[in-house]
Every structure is written in C-alpha cells, then in structure tokens.
C-alpha cells in the first residue's frame, strides 16, 4: 500500500471503529480531521508483537476505551508525533466471558412403561431449589388441560452427564402431594371431600417455589395470584396471601372487581433472602393497565409477618412479550432474573439470565440489569449431549420454549430446567416431544478471544438468516460475533422511533392481511418518488404492534420465510436495550449505528427525527461522548444539525449514484460523486467522524460485473481523518461481483469471504454485512 492513507496490510489496531470514534469524541469534543492530511503514514508490526482482534485503523486516531481493559497497539513508521503516547500491548491470549455447559441431565417426556406411577411422568419443571446434597425439590409444570391432576413437589437427583462421566438420567426419589387439611384455602377446591383435601391444578397454578430454613415451602401461584405457605409435608398451613397488585381473570373468587393482572401473568418468579425473612414475588407479565408493556413488578413480602411490605421495584424485559419466569437472590440486594420469550429452537430470540441490584436503577427508574448468560449460546468444549438434537453441539443452545427454573449453587454454577412444550411444538427433534432437561453452567467461564479482521456491522441484524430489523435478527447477529448492529429508524404516528428499512411496510410486514388497515393504503411522494402502500407514520405504535414481520426478499432468501409472521416490529428503544445488555465476542458492549431514514420527508410532515432519536439514546444512557453509538444518514442537513445537538459519533453515507435528497430538495447541484472526492470528503470531516461508502465507490465494476482497480476514495477519506465503512456485503451471487460468484443461481451463496478480503486489502476499516458469521470468521492474514 502507498503511504497516502493505509499502511502495510500487517498493521492492525485493537479496538473496533465505533469505540475509536466514541473515544475520539470524548477526548476532543470537536469535529473535523484528527489527522494532518499532509502526513503520510505507514504501519508495520513486529513478528513478536501480538496482533489484537478487530479493527485496523493505521491512520491518525488510534484510540480506545481504556476503562474496558483493552488496548491498541501499532508501530508507525516514519511519523514523529508528540502525542498520543504509546499504548499498552494487549495480551494475545486475552480471555473473554463465554458461559460454559458443564453438565446435563434429562428424563423421559413419556412414561417408561404403562405401569409407571403418575409421579414418574413429569412434563418439566417450573421451579426448583437445591438441598445442598445433590438433590433438588422441583415443582413440575402443570398441564392446563389436566385440571384434575394432583399438585406435587418432587425430590429429584440428577446423575449429571459430565465430561467422561455420568449417565445423564434424573431419578425421582419421592414426592409431596399438596393438600389443605386445615381448610386454610378460603375458596372451594375441586377435591374438598377427599381425604386431606388434596389440591389439584383446578385450584392453584403454582409456578414458583422457595424452601425456608425451617424446611417449609412457599409457592407462588399464577391464578390468584397467591403466595401459599406449606409445611414439610406439603400441607397448607396458613391462609394464602393475595397480591396487593390485584387479581387475574382466573381468580377462583370472581367477585366484582375487574382483573388488574393478566391471564397467566401471576407469580412465576419468587426469590428469597438467605435467612428466609423476605420473599420477592415477580409478575410474569405486565399489569392490565400498564402503558409500558415491558414493565414487570417485583414486590417485597415479609414471610414472618405473612404480609407485603409495600415496597416494589420495576424491572424492564427486553421486549413486551417476554416473560419473567424465575428469580433468585444471590446476595443481600443482588437478584438473578430468568427472562425468556415464547419461542423455541431456531425461532427463539431471548433466553437470558440478568443480574440486577435492588438498590440501583437506570435513568428511567427501572432496575439496571447486566447480562449473566445468554442461554442460546453456551460454550460446550466437551461436546456434552452432542448429536442429541437441535442445539446440542458446540456451542450448545438451551433454546427450549419452556425454560422455567433457575437455581444458583454455592460454587457459583447455575442450574436451569426446562421441559416439554405443552403447546406441542418440539425443539430438539421434529415430531418428538422434548424431554424435561436440566443443565448446569459455569457463568464465569472464559475463552480466548478470536483474532479477526475488520469491524463487522450487522446490516439490519443477521438479515441473511432472519427477516431484517427484528430482534431475532439482531440477537442472532450478536451471537454470530458482530461488533455493531444497525437499525434503520423511522417514526410512528405518535412519534416513536421504530426499526424498519423504509417507512412503507407493505413488503416487510403482514399489514396487507389486516382488513382493519385496508383503508390506510395510500400513495405518497417519498424523496421525490411516488410510493403506494402502508406507512409507519400513519400507525400508532400500538397499531404497529399488531403486525408481524416478513422477509423482504423471499425470492433470494426463501429460507427466511419460515420466520414470517412471528416477530413484531421492534422499537429503537428495544434495539438499544438489546445492544447495551449484550456483549460482543470480544467482551465489549455491542455498538449501535442507527440510520435516519428520509429525515427531510419526516421533517416536512411535522415529525423531525432528531429529537425522538436523541431522546431514545438518552433513555438508554447511550448519549455521551464515549457511548458506542454512531448515527448515520444518507442526507447531510440532519447530520449537520445533529453535530450541534449530540456528542455521539456521526457517519455520512455515500451512495453509488444520485445525490442526498436534502440537496435535491434545496436545488444543491452536489452529488454523491462530488462528496466522494478529496475535497468532498474533507468537507464531510467537518461534521462527521466516519464515511459509509457504497462498494462501487471504493472498487468499481466493469460492465460484466468484475472488479476494477480501487479508486482513491478510501485513501482520501483516511487523509481527511475519516473511518471508512463499506456497504453492503451479502453472500448471494446476485449481490456479489462476478469474480466471486459460484454457479448461475442468483440466490446461491458465492465467495463472500473473498469479496470482504479484497475490500479490506483496499483499506476499508469495517463493513456492513447481512452475514456477520462469515465476516467474524475472517482471520488476520490478508495475503
């Protein structure tokens, strides 16, 4: 490489571009070039110097977030600078967190024989507590259709399958049958004339369990909901305590009061203090009148006085349909929360354990949460359960639909339990009911960070494998080791930023199948073009939430159509929260690069985008100079306005042809071609930190689709102090240069890896891709 912008291909820098840019903003708080355009630079790396993971930036601003314990290293050749000082060299064997599967056990989903006792048939577990001797008291899932079944608590002993030992079977030692012999329950029960008044699934729906130091139990019920105290034999010993938050529609005493708790939204999680004095019941779903569908209420209950204390906390789930299914205290104020969606297998999006401190909230007043483990990606180096169906390789995925129970162990390991999907949709094997399954994980396990080249930005999420702009696509991208996720941003009628590629949603949702919205189909002029369809600005967020997403290009990605009709349109707030509550495969927070779509159009209809966007960033605590955020746009005016409103990074997108629409609307003759010149890029550097170049701007194609020689655009951008991001890299032949196509099928996969390598060799720093797994697997050897 010449010295005009990029150095030798062996020069590498250890931080991703988004952190370099945010650190730059934090240190300088001003726009414009950070590098003298006249200074020629080249870089080399000593063979003995460790090469860090992602993000090569051999020019000017070699920055990072030192507080994260990561460092940059680069050796400039022929450049004398008084600052910055030499940065520490990172450890080539740097360890990053990846929770590990250490043991697994299962039990049959069906009776072992027709003579098996009823207690041996357990569909799964809603809750469990450890006894400290390798056994567990476990509360089984209740089949809602089997209301005559007696309620039981089972004592089980897993023979854990570990590396080289264990059968992986679960033995049921005995069980307690719940009963109400002292007639403490104040409403009629189904077996009120039976001996000891046996309790059945028609009376209570127990979903959570705690065992007290005196050997008694408390169970949390969803139907009332109630807290119920049981003695060591499973007998009710005091009147069940109703929730102060109200009643559910399933309450056994209908009464005249309206339901305030949703059906199935009762006490699915129940934490307890170490001394058993305090219990913390958590509602599974939002309250009926709750405006924020993501809010879940944690209450405090004095188990000695058997009354609620009046203290509550607000916990926010990742998306409004997520459920809080278990919670455990692991310190005086520290709580682990098991949160999940209602999907299983490939469709699953969220099966996560978070840590919250009951004394710490975020800006919104919700409990600040930190990710402990993503159960959809567990390290499995011993290949436990390998070949036992979907998700049992390495990595291992605990993607059962009904993951329900969380049990902390004294050594820091966590046990989780899930069971047969009572809706009849199996996860592990098609057509075969899932066996009830227990896993033990080490949440503090680490792996060595992989070396990879370039910053990987998941374009609309992992949109090569899931419908774009869904939480499913973004979450998959993170598991595939993307550094950054990209949501396109449009507004609803009530001004809420949501993630869609366009404000017209006829091609990416099922809106056309909703007769109630048939009259919303209209024709509009969007950026000078006539478009007919349904538009986000004509729908409230609540209305948009009734829609489900679809694959935008089914003819190219037919496999993605299997996910049609499953996922809602996410809000920008949900995307930001997913990012800030996740970590990259490098152990860094996941970056976010929101793109404002059609800002001139939205401003023209009285909905300027800047304030809602910045408000969303502020609510997520992602509005400071060191936040891992870069706002991008194809227009110029809104970036210049944002330059005066925010300290987060900015990136100017440059298309292969045409001009920014705000230029066209104002009669400005400048085009994207003008902006890609040395002078144009220097002007961009006055208000932006990065430039997102269309691939053809960097390396044009011949009329036959083959690549030509690179232009000077990358070198000129680097000379102006801009980070260069290329777009968009997709694996299908229809998107690839002819050099890298395989076969003649436009939808078939070509050699995307080779295309990415070619552009990285031309100096590109990072890139947008629909296939972050392919990008994240690239190693550092570009030769």
Image (cartoon, rainbow, N blue to C red):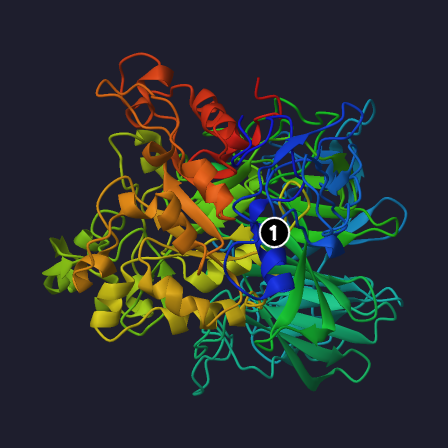
Horizontal side of 333 relative to 640 (left or right) equals right
The location of residue 453, given as percent across then percent down, is 58, 31
Asked whether, in this view, residue 752 is left or right of residue 417, the answer is left
The one nearer the camera, 695 or 383, is 695
Query: Can residue 396 be seen at all in this image of the molecule?
Result: no
Residue drawn at the location 61% of the way across and 50% of the way down: 20
Residue at the farthest top position: 743
Residue 496 in the image: above or below residue 352:
below
Q: Residues within 10 Å of mark 1 (few under 14, many from 20)?
A: many
Residue 701 sits above or below residue 209 on the image: above
Task: Indicate left or right for 634 with 690 as reference.
Answer: left
In the picture, the quarter occupied by the C terminus is: top right
Residue on which the image places disc 1: 19
Q: Quadrant of residue 677?
A: top left
- Across and down, in percent, residue 271 comes to 73, 66
Occupied quadrant, residue 539: bottom left
Q: Quadrant of residue 200?
A: bottom right
- Observer-nearest residue: 168 or 4? 4
Above or below 749: residue 711: below
Between 768 and 448, the one lying in front of the other is 768
Q: Position of residue 82 (x, y in %)?
A: 74, 51
Is the N terminus in the top left, top right, bottom left or bottom right quadrant?
Answer: top right
Residue 96 shows in the view: yes
- Provide the secondary structure element on which disc 1 rests: helix
Q: 110 and 416: which one is in front? A: 416
Q: Position of residue 456 (x, y in %)?
A: 52, 39
Q: Residue at x 51, y 31 (%)?
A: 775
Residue 579 drawn above or below residue 231:
above
């Amino acid at each position: 490489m010449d010295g005009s912008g990029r150095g030798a291909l062996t020069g590498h820098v250890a931080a991703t571009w988004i952190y370099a840019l945010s650190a730059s903003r934090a240190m300088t708080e001003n726009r414009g070039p950070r590098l003298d355009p006249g200074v020629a630079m080249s870089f080399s790396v000593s063979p003995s110097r460790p090469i860090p993971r992602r993000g090569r930036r051999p020019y000017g601003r070699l920055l990072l977030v030192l507080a994260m314990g990561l460092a940059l290293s680069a050796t400039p050749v022929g450049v004398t600078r008084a600052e910055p000082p030499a940065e520490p060299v990172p450890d080539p064997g740097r360890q990053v967190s990846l929770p590990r599967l250490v043991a697994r056990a299962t039990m049959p989903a069906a009776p072992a024989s027709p003579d098996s006792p009823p207690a041996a048939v357990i569909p799964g577990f809603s809750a469990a507590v450890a006894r400290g001797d390798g056994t567990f008291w476990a509360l089984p899932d209740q089949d809602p259709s089997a209301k005559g079944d007696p309620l039981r608590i089972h004592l089980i002993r897993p023979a854990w399958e570990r590396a080289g030992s264990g059968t992986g079977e679960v033995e049921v030692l005995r069980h307690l049958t719940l009963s109400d012999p002292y007639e403490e329950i104040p409403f009629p029960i189904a077996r009120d004339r039976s001996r000891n008044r046996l309790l059945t699934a028609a009376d209570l729906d127990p979903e959570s369990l705690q065992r007290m130091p005196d050997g008694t139990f408390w169970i949390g019920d969803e139907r009332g909901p109630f807290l119920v105290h049981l003695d060591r034999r499973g007998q009710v010993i005091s009147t069940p305590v109703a929730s102060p938050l109200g009643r559910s529609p399933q309450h056994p005493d209908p009464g005249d009061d309206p339901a305030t708790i949703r059906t199935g939204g009762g006490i699915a999680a129940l934490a307890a203090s170490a001394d058993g004095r305090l219990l913390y019941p958590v509602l599974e779903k939002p309250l009926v009148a709750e405006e924020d569908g993501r809010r879940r209420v944690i209450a405090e209950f004095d188990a000695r006085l058997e009354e609620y204390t009046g203290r509550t906390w607000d916990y926010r789930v990742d998306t409004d349909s997520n459920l809080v299914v278990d919670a455990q205290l692991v310190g005086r104020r520290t709580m682990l929360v098991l949160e999940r969606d209602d999907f299983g297998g490939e469709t699953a999006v969220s099966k996560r354990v978070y840590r919250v401190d009951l004394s710490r909230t975020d800006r919104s007043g919700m409990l600040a949460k930190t990710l402990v483990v993503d159960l959809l990606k567990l390290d499995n180096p011993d290949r436990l359960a390998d070949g036992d169906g979907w998700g049992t390789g390495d990595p291992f995925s605990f993607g059962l639909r009904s993951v329900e129970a969380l049990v902390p162990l004294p050594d820091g390991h966590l046990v989780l339990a899930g069971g047969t999907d009572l809706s009849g949709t199996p996860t592990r094997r098609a057509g075969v009911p899932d066996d009830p399954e227990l896993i033990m994980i080490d949440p503090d396990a680490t792996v060595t960070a992989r070396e990879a080249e370039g910053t990987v930005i998941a374009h609309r999420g992992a949109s090569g494998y899931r419908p774009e702009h869904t939480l499913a696509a973004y979450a998959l991208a993170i598991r595939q080791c993307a550094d950054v996720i990209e949501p396109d941003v449009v507004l609803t009628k009530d001004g809420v930023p949501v993630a869609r590629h366009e404000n017209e949603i006829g091609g990416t949702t099922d809106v056309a199948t909703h007769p109630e919205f048939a009259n919303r189909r209209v024709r509009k002029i969007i950026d000078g073009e006539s478009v007919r369809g349904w538009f986000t600005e004509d729908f409230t967020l609540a209305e948009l939430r009734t829609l489900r997403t679809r694959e935008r290009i089914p003819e190219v990605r037919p496999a993605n159509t299997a996910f049609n009709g499953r996922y809602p349109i996410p809000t920008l707030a949900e995307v930001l929260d997913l990012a800030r509550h996740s970590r990259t495969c490098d152990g860094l927070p996941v970056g976010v690069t929101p793109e404002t779509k059609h800002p001139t159009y939205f401003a023209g209809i009285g909905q300027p985008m800047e304030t809602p966007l910045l408000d969303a960033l502020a609510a997520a605590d992602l509005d400071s100079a060191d936040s891992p955020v870069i706002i991008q746009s194809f227009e110029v005016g809104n970036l210049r306005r944002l330059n005066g409103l925010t300290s987060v990074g900015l990136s100017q997108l440059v298309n292969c042809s045409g001009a920014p629409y705000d230029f066209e609307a104002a009669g400005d003759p400048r085009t994207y071609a003008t902006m890609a010149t040395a002078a144009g890029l220097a002007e961009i550097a006055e208000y932006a930190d990065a430039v997102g170049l269309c691939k053809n701007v960097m390396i044009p194609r011949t009329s036959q689709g083959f690549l030509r020689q690179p232009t000077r655009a990358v070198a000129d951008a680097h000379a102006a102090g801009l980070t260069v991001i290329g777009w968009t890299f997709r694996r299908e032949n229809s998107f690839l240069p002819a050099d890298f196509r395989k076969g003649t099928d436009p939808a078939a996969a070509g050699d995307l890896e080779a295309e990415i390598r070619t552009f990285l060799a031309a100096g590109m720093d990072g890139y947008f891709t629909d296939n972050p797994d392919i990008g994240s697997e690239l190693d550092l050897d570009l030769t």
